[in-house]
Amino acid sequence: MNNYAYYLSEMEIQLDKAEEMISNVIQLEPSNATYLDTYAWVLFKRGKYMEALFIIEQAMENGGIPWVLFLNITAIYCIK
């Protein structure tokens, strides 16, 4: 579900569905940095920049892949 939510966000289609899907995944594994990163990206694509920033910071705290998170947090900061 994580990959599909990410795919939807990249295609910028069904973003509400993508957010719902990744939100459900996060409930199962709330400290998974990869899932948090996807959740932040979906929020970013939906224009929820402050929420996205909060979530991406959680992903960083949970040991996500630094360069991936750096790219995403940079995009969020540039738009915010």
Image (cartoon, rainbow, N blue to C red):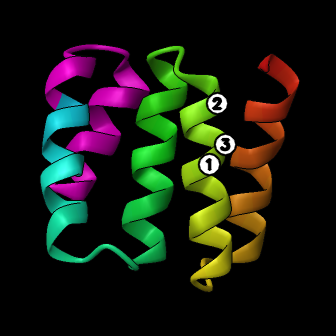
The crowding category of the residue bearing disc 2, from other C-alpha atoms within 10 Å (few below 14, some 14 to 19, many at least 20), is: some
In x, y percent, where is residue 33? Answer: 48, 74
**Residue 53 disc label:** 3
Mark drawn on residue 39: none
Q: In this view, does 3 lie to the left or right of 60?
A: left
Asked whether the beta carbons under mark 3 and mark 1 sit within 8 Å of each other, the answer is yes
80 relative position to 17: left or right: right
Which amino acid type corresponds to the residue marked 1 in the rendered image? Answer: Phe
Tell me the element at label 3: helix
Give the residue pinned by disc 2. Answer: 50
**Image coords of residue 46 (percent x, y):** 44, 17
Res. 5 image quadrant? top left
Residue at 27% x, 29% y is 8
Quadrant where the N terminus lies? bottom left
Q: Is mark 2 on a helix, strand or loop?
A: helix
Q: Cα distance, mark 1 to mark 2? A: 6 Å
Residue named by callout 1: 54
Q: Where is residue 10 in the image (x, y as percent from the top left)?
A: 42, 29
Toward the viewer: 8 or 78? Answer: 78
Please determine whether, in this image, residue 39 is positioned above or below residue 8: below
Residue type at mark 3 is Leu
Asked if the residue under mark 2 is in contact with the one under mark 3, i.e. CB atoms within 8 Å, the reply is yes
The residues colored magenta run 1-17
Q: In which quarter of the image is the C terminus?
A: top right
* Real-space CA distance between mark 3 and mark 1, rounded to the nearest whole angstrom: 4 Å
Crowdedness near tag 1: few (<14), some (14–19) or many (≥20) residues, C-alpha within 10 Å: few
Task: Measure the C-alpha gap from mark 3 to mark 2.
Answer: 5 Å
